[in-house]
Amino acid sequence: METYSTPGRTAYPRFRSVAVPAAVLVAVNIALMYVVAATPLSAVNDLLFSVPILGFIVYGAALTGGNIAAERGLQSGSMALAAFGTLLLQVAYGLFGGGVLGRAPADLRGTLLAVTLAVTVAMTVAIAAYVYLRDAEFDHWSTWSFGAFIVGAVLVLVGSFVPVVLALGFLFVFLGFALRLGYEIWHIKANYDPNSALTHALGIYVAFTGVFVHVLQIALRMFAER
């Protein structure tokens, strides 16, 4: 992103004004996951996902509602609404990630988070490079992301009764967040507005953290199988 340029403007100001607040939100969420994992709140995940579609609906509603509230708050200048939406996002991701992390031994949790962060950052850099180095439109990735979430929801619903299908649901939801991350990165490239830097940062944070919690689940499984 730092090497991409347009007449009289480089990507660096965009990178700084978007990535810094997004990184702060991600850092706070990771810290929250670590704290939740050490508390009884980590059991919330197991309770909700005792019926997988219930967990999907609860977290899906919290993330969607939080995203809409935070975005509208930023766009309208209502900091109270933006703060409420961001808090809802932080709590939803914190409970979900903390629930996943809580299944790991306490001495491995820091390592799991570090590995997950490294993999997620590498994925983000790869997606950003693909988007920035190609002279193409990526607005359709938003539609593909929505479609992946819908397919994922249907598969999770079926998987609630036929567990073998759940893995496919996981993959489609994971794909939905990855596509959304690519779209948000392209949106900054194509339609960056300095006055909407925090809105751009919110989009990156939501998508990045969605990818993060899915990578965390994969990392946990890999460590458990060792």
Image: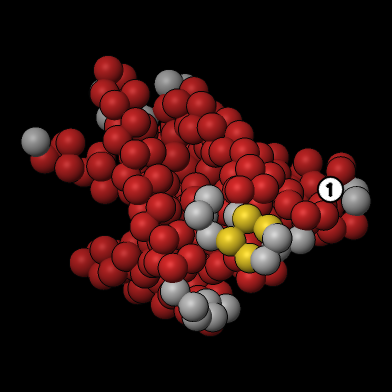
Q: Which residue is located at x 62 percent, y 38 percent?
A: 20
Q: Residues within 10 Å of mark 1 (few under 14, many from 20)?
A: some
What residue is at 57 percent from the left and 78 percent from the top? 139
Residue of label 1: 81
- Can the viewer see residue 154? no
Q: Is mark 1 on a helix, strand or loop?
A: helix
Q: Is residue 43 above or below residue 212?
A: above
Q: Is residue 58 left or right of residue 78?
A: left
Q: Where is residue 134 in the image (x, y as percent from the top left)?
A: 44, 74
Q: Which of the 4 quarters of the picture holds residue 121?
A: top left
Can you give x and y, in whole percent of width and height, for residue 19 in the image? 59, 44
Query: Which percent across, then down, holds residue 161?
Result: 31, 68
Q: What residue type is labelled 1?
A: Leu
Please state if 225 lies on the left or on the right of 104 as rendered: left
Q: Is residue 1 above or below residue 46?
A: below
Task: Give residue 69's position: percent from left, percent from top.
Answer: 77, 55
Left or right: residue 181 versus residue 17 is left
Q: Is residue 137 visible?
A: yes
Instruction: Report which quarter residue 199 is drawn in.
Output: bottom right
